[in-house]
Image: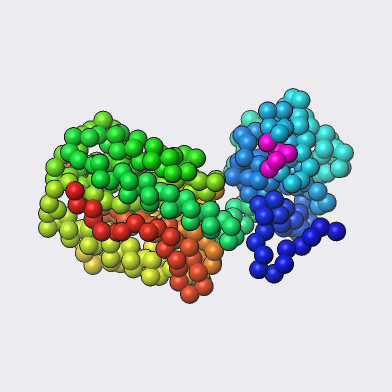
């Protein structure tokens, strides 16, 4: 009999993956499935620990099988605690062979995460009595609430991200380009332990700061400009996300007023975060502050999103969202104001939801950084 962890003892990554697979397997009968096929990379990693780029996972009532190719034979043996099959050809051939051997009839799959080509290829190979059944979303629901070990990895990613920011900002000055700053931020986070950025770093100065997802360009910073920096690190597979604002020179009264409005909106949103709260209510708390300043129409996106193995995961914190927060969710709170031909201001932190409130993981000061 396998040793069971004692109460309060943290699960190892392998045991954690195994526990998750058991949860998925236990739900098969209730969903009228004989097996569940996982093809989406983050879900594969969540359920198996495998970090390679080519794999399929078949979860059966009594066992799980990971299919991958010879490039990953050694890696899979190191990372995966379930049965591993190394395919000599297309993974689907070995997968279909396992489906036939186990006499599987109804195979659940992830419809929103599988291409039409992959679906048709697999469907054409299935045994006569087997069929694919759309059954997505369950793993994503599990992933929304993070385990203590996942929160610890996100915490490390957040700290790496913030340290990279603090090491880079002293070098910002008029004349350097948006691309220069983005490249330096990403270089610093890698030197500090990140695998890569968790998304393409956003750096935009002047009127371009009004573009919420601006891509860095060769434009050079000038005195009197706002600069938005939205950055995240991917470390040990988990993402972080933070937005901070810089100003070159002496901020104008208008800049100070808008910044105060966005900061108050963010603090109101954070104050609304606790287990049981509707995600739409967090959005409303931030949006209502901006409305008092007459800036609510310039807030053109949702207040936040979940993050973990992906930079954007459920839940979404928008005005029409129906979900409720749960303890252990990791989310962002990031209201912003965007004024065309003037500029934009956004402030964002990574946060863990608790029963009575939240823990703000981001240590970086929210003050406007004046350079």
| Residue at 30% in and 38% down | 181
x 54%, y 46%: residue: 236
Q: Identify the colour scheme used.
A: rainbow
Extreme residue in the bottom direction: 356
Q: Nearer the viewer, residue 231 or 5?
A: 5
Closest to the observer, 37 or 43: 43
- Percent position of residue 176, x then y: 22, 35
Q: Main secondary structure of the magenta part?
A: helix
Relative to 130, does residue 279 appear above or below in the rendering? below
Image position of 133 (left or right of 301): right
x and y percentages locating residue 360 in the rendered image: 42, 63
Residue occupying image coordinates x 72% and y 32%: 73
The answer to whether residue 168 is visible is yes
Can residue 109 be seen by looking at this rendering? no
* Residue 329 location (% of width, % of height): 52, 61
Q: Is residue 203 left or right of residue 318?
A: left
The one of 147 and 121 positioned closer to us in this rendering: 147
Which residues are drawn in magenta? Answer: 75-79
Q: Is residue 371 left or right of residue 131?
A: left
């Amino acid at each position: 009999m396998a040793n069971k962890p004692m109460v309060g003892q943290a699960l190892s990554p392998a045991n954690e993956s195994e526990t998750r697979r058991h949860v998925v397997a236990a739900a098969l009968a209730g969903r009228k499935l004989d097996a569940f096929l996982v093809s989406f990379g983050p879900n594969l990693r969540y359920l198996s620990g495998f970090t390679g780029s080519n794999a399929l996972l078949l979860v059966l009532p009594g066992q799980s099988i990971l299919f991958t190719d010879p490039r990953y034979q050694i890696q899979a043996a190191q990372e995966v605690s379930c049965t591993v099959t190394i395919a000599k050809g297309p993974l689907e051939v070995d997968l279909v062979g396992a489906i036939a051997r186990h006499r599987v009839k109804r195979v659940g799959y992830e419809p929103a995460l599988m291409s039409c080509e992959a679906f048709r290829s697999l469907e054409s190979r299935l045994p006569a009595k087997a069929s694919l059944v759309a059954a997505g979303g369950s793993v994503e629901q599990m992933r929304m609430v993070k385990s203590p070990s996942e929160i610890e990895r996100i915490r490390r990613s957040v700290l790496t991200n913030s340290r990279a920011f603090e090491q880079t900002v002293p070098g910002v000055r008029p004349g350097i380009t948006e691309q220069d700053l983005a490249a330096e931020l990403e270089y610093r986070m890698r030197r500090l332990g990140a695998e890569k950025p968790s998304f393409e770093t956003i750096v935009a100065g002047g009127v371009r700061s009004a573009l919420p997802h601006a891509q860095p360009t060769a434009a050079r910073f000038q005195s009197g400009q706002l600069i938005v920096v939205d950055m995240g690190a991917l470390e040990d597979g988990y993402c972080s996300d933070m937005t901070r604002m810089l100003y070159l020179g002496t901020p104008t009264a208008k800049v100070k007023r808008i910044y105060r409005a966005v900061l108050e909106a963010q603090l109101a949103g954070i104050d609304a975060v606790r287990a049981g709260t509707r995600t739409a209510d967090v959005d409303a708390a931030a949006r209502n502050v901006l409305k008092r300043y007459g800036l609510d129409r310039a807030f053109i996106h949702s207040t936040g999103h979940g993050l973990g193995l992906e930079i954007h995961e459920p839940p979404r914190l928008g005005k029409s969202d129906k979900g409720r927060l749960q303890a252990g969710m990791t989310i962002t709170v990031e209201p912003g104001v965007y004024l065309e031909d003037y500029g934009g201001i956004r402030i964002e932190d990574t946060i863990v939801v608790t029963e009575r409130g939240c823990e703000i993981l981001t240590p970086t000061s929210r003050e406007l950084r004046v350079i």
